[in-house]
Image (cartoon, rainbow, N blue to C red):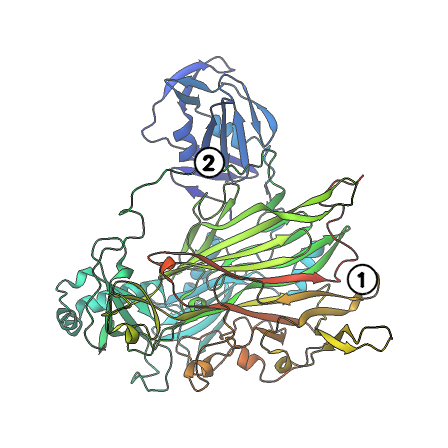
Amino acid sequence: MRSIIRGRHALIVRGLGLVIAFACGGSIFWTGPAEAHGGAAQMVPLQQTAENFGATVRRDSFADVFTVSRNGVLVRVKPGSKTALVNGEPLQLDVPVVMRKGAAYVSHDFINRVFQSGLDKTFVVERVASPLNPLTADEIRSAVDILKASGRYKPGLRFTEISVKRPPKDEVWRFALSGQSVQAPRQAEFVALDGKKVIEGAVDLAARSLVAWKPVDGAHGMVLLDDFATVQSAIEASSDYAKALATRGIADVRKVVATPLTVGYFDGKDSLRQEDRLLKAVSYLDVGDGNYWAHPIEGLVAVIDLEQRKVIKIEDGGLVPVPLKPTPYDGRDRVATLSPKPLEITEPEGKNYTITGNTLHWRNWDFHVRLDSRVGLVLSTVTYNDKGAKRKVMYEGSLGGMIVPYGDPDVGWYFKAYLDSGEYGMGTLTSPIEPNKDAPQNAVLLDATLADYTGAPVKVPRAIAVFERYADPEFKHQEMGKPNLSAERRELVVRWISTVGNYDYLFDWVFAENGTIGINAGATGIEAVKGVKSRTMQDATAAEDTRYGTLLDHHIVGTTHQHIYNFRLDLDVDGEKNSLTEVDPVVAPNTRGGPRTSAMQTVQRTVATEQQAAQKFDPSTIRLLSNPARNNRVGNPVSYQIIPYAGGTHPIAKGANFAKDEWINHRLSFMDRQLWVTRYNADELFPEGKYPNRSNNDTGLGQFTADNQDIVDTDNVVWLTTGTTHVARAEEWPIMPTEWVHALLKPWNFFDETPTLGLSRPAK
């Protein structure tokens, strides 16, 4: 996942060596001091050269020191000095930094010299590749070539997924813990669309053979990126759509921006045929302010048949004037304010973590990361090194699925309930992370490779960020008259961002030294708004216009909706045989005598079956995934606590805000219960089912739990639902500050004592 190409430079791997080649377009070159071998050095400007390489340069004018940093490497050098510090280690330069007309110049080989010095230990060569490593670009191309040679391929076949087929779980664990090679051959699995027909398949990459080909009856495939273009071209070609626009005073359809939206399922009440591959388009007017989202063409919906590539139906809810007030969100209409003074986050001696291929090691944690085209960031084989022994915590964790349902029943809104990962592919819609903005200055940014809908490999730049941060005191105690005892808490954050239409979603996996894992989901971007007649809340139409939302601006309502996330957590707490345990603090009569009439006690029980485990979250009950066969030193079963709601900034979503007879409740079960536990099944990956687009029944958790399997002392998967009910407010318009919801996995008698004793502070 390391960067292969960025801007005008390239990293070229040759064996175990690394050659950095780059061009400085428009740079001013001049000959400077003599190099060590006697020739005159060719000098290039430090600032431009470093930035072309993707590094940042800062100058401390007081200390007269230049700092050059990029992805874990921090270089400090003073003008005139032939010694640079690379992550705190001295490196001799052939030519010093030279000042000329107030600008710093370095030898043309300065970047190669410092970034190939070998003094940075962040990235380590992977000697034996993990079986979970994502497909390389060559493997993606090879998979498609094998399919083409099999005789099954035909022109026009499109891919919703090409990804590594995961070997059996026990083999992967043996590799992660002991390095034992897996026996399963490396395979690539794919889902393809032949017109509207869905096909699942797999190829053996070593044997170069097609090993699976299975048409899937009754399924609608995911929305692909070329479907977006189909929707836009369809509305531009539709005479009926042009007439509907004309009634709204819009003469140029090319100024209309269509958004491709899935249509859901309503048992024929929407007059749509279930067998058709359809999308709906609601549209916005581009008025030139850079924010077409602020100009909804309200009440106008086009239904597009993706096979016919045309508009087959217009749904018109009546004329509402398009809000035309310029509402840019990029600051172009604002007076620029002074930038804040720099906030420096430096790691002058390098990182506390290493990245070996796709495996991260930080403090006592080890885990594998990859990017999946559907669910995005996936973490696997998570272990904690406890006093020299690697202990299993989680085999695999990722976003399982999510839904954003809206509550407005009007023609342009009733069908809006987006299954962002299952219908659109949130990994495919990964948003590149902007350095120093989307992630802090000290973040390492990792590229990824996915297959596009044609089967071609595509590099996803800056797909994942990894960074360490200060996270308050780990512990503190002050005894009167004695020295204070405090220890710093550190966290390692792995961040991924996906942009799905108007919303941008940030997902953080946060590892603490004390064994806790946080899962944070943040929503930002632009609210989906509705055009209305009301200008202010004093207008006669305001009460009706705001029945389903909040008036945010003149003629703009932010509609009430929800963001409901479900995380699939294949926890293996010190092994695969786990049970769900519930602990309730209770008030009990005092039977021991004395003045007290009551006492606090706990009542503990084991949940027997999958259906009993599916429940709403009561924060007063402690829920643990326990390993009854493994005890800590005083005999308590080792466990991890499961907390779906560990704080947040929006009101929590206690469940779906829909009546029980709504069809969305027939299609999905995961919204209404915050905790599910199912027996492990390698094929049960998504809480909404594998093919949720236009589904008419629950093929996800509802189906997984229908057989109500026993979950006592078995290999179990925890499905954790969390989220918010989003009631809009003025402070979120025209662009929404990030709003977070937090979940937590916390060790509970997993350790024998405070796990950071001796880790967070030096032993005496």
Q: Considering depth in this image, is 8 or 384 the residue closer to the camera?
A: 384
Report x, y in % for residue 294. Answer: 27, 60
Dividing the picture into quadrants, the one containing residue 424 is bottom left
Q: Considering depth in this image, is 87 or 161 the residue closer to the camera?
A: 87
The residue positioned 65% from the left and 57% from the top of the image is: 516
Residue 471 located left or right of residue 387: left
The residue positioned 72% from the left and 75% from the top of the image is: 586
Tell me the tag on residue 342.
2
The residue wearing badge 1 is 632
Dividing the picture into quadrants, the one containing residue 569 is bottom right
Report x, y in % for residue 165. Answer: 54, 64
> Which badge, 2 or 1, is on the more N-terminal residue?
2
Q: Considering depth in this image, is 216 or 663 the residue closer to the camera?
A: 663
Report x, y in % for residue 738. Answer: 44, 56
Judge depth for marks 2 and 1 and give the one in front: 2
- Up the image or down, 214 lies above or below 500; here it is below
Regarding mark 2 in the picture, which secondary structure is present there? loop
Dot 2 amino acid type: Pro
Residue 594 located left or right of residue 531: right
Dot 1 amino acid type: Asn
